[in-house]
Amino acid sequence: MPDPSAPQVPPPWVTEAVGAVQGAQRIRWGFTNESWRVTANGGRALVVTRMADPGAARLVVQRGPAISAALAGVGITVPIPIPIPIPEGAGPGRAVVVSAFVPGRSGMELIGDAQAAVSLGRVVGEAWLALSRVETAGLDLDDHWARPNDLAAAARRWLDMASPSMAPATAREVSLRIEELPGLLAGRPSSFVHGDLVPANVLVDDGELAALLDLETVRLGERLLDAAWFRWIVRYHHPDVERAAWSGFASASGVDETDPIVGPLLEILPAVRILEVLGQSTLGAAARQRWLDQLRVCAAPSANRPAG
C-alpha cells in the first residue's frame, strides 16, 4: 500500500470526475477496480473508483441509494454513490463511481494472523446475519440465483463456455456439482445476497464493521452463497488462516456445515459463482486464467473440506 505521507498525483479520470483536488491517495479497496481517496476543494473526503465493468458502474449509481438505505435499515453502512456529470464520449469516465469516504481498514489488511482472522470472520459473520434481514421490496434485484432450475441451466451454459479451457476431470467434477443444485436449493427461501462478501469488500473500524463495499453483485438468492464465498476466497488466498477466519464466521453466524443441506451447498456454490465470473464478457485473458485456476482448485474433491 502506498505511503500515506507520500504525495500522489491522481490519474486524469479522477480529476475529470470531481475536479481539482487538494490531496489524493490510492487506496487498497478490492482487486478488480481502482480506487482513490481524494480531498476535494472544500475539504470533502471522497472515494473515486474506476470500475472494470462500465455496466456494473451504471448499476451501482442507479441502485446505490436505494440499496444503501435498505442496508442502513439493518445497521450496515455502504458508501452512497454521488451522481456526477459524465461527458458523453468519455470512455473511462463512464465507469467511474464517486462516493463519500468511510473511515476504516480493508479486511485484506486485517487477516494477517490467526487472531486477526478470527476477529474479521466474526465481523463478516455478523454482517451475513444482518444481510438476511434486509427488506428487498422495491430494490429491483436480479433473482436468477433464487430460481434453482434456472440457475442450474445457467451454470451448465457457463460450464460449456469454460470447458475448452479446463481439464476434463475438472469439467466433470463441476458438472456433477451442478446437477445437485436444484435438489439442494428446492424449497429454500431467498434473501438479499451481497454476492462478493470477501475481506476486500469489508471495512473495519475499531473491531467492528464500518462499511460494506461494492454493490454491483447484489442479488436475491440462497443466503449461503455469501457464507460459502467468504469461506472459499479466504481458503484460496489465505490458506494459513482459513480455519481461524471460518471459526470466527461460524461462531458469529451459527452456520452449521454438518447440516446435510448446508454442508454440500457450502461446497457447491463457490464453483457456480466462479463459473458465473468466467461467463462475463469483460473478463481479460489474465483474469480469466486466474479464475480458471480457482475453479480447478475449488473443484478438487477435498478443496472445500476443513483442513486436518
Image (spheres, rainbow, N blue to C red):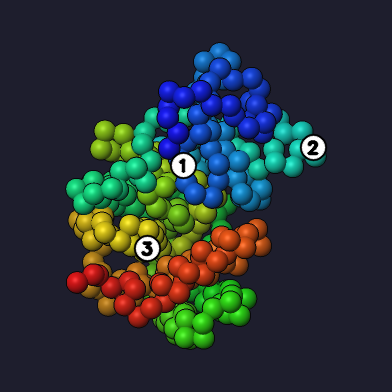
In this picture, residue 120 sits left or right of residue 296: left
**Between disc 3 and disc 2, whose residue precedes?**
2
**Between disc 1 and disc 2, whose residue precedes?**
1
Q: Compared with residue 178, is residue 284 higher up or lower down, i.e. above or below?
A: above
**Between disc 3 and disc 1, whose residue precedes?**
1
Report crowding for label 2: few under 14, some 14 to 19, many 20 or more residues within 10 A (C-alpha): few
Most extreme residue toward the top, as rendered? 42
Q: Are marks 3 and 2 in contact (CB under 8 Å)?
A: no
Residue 169 in the image: x percent, y percent? 47, 86
Most extreme residue toward the right, as rendered? 89
- The amino acid beneath tag 3 is Tyr
Which residue, given by chain and number where applicable, does mark 2 sit on? 88
Name the secondary structure under disc 1.
Answer: loop
- The amino acid beneath tag 2 is Glu
x 47%, y 46%: residue: 30
Q: Where, by quadrant of the figure, is residue 251 drawn?
A: bottom left
Q: Nearer the viewer, residue 152 or 40?
A: 40
x 34%, y 42%: residue: 109
Q: Compared with residue 99, is residue 185 higher up or lower down, i.e. above or below?
A: below
- The amino acid beneath tag 1 is Trp
Which residue, given by chain and number where applicable, does mark 1 sit on? 29
Q: State the CA–CA distance, disc 3 to disc 1.
A: 19 Å
In this picture, residue 206 sits left or right of residue 267: left
Which residue, given by chain and number where applicable, does mark 3 sit on? 236
Q: State the CA–CA distance, disc 3 to disc 2.
A: 41 Å
Residue 128 in the image: x percent, y percent? 34, 52
Q: Which of 253 and 110 is in front in this view?
A: 110
Please identify the quadrant where the N terminus is shown: top left
Q: Nearer the viewer, residue 219 or 201?
A: 201
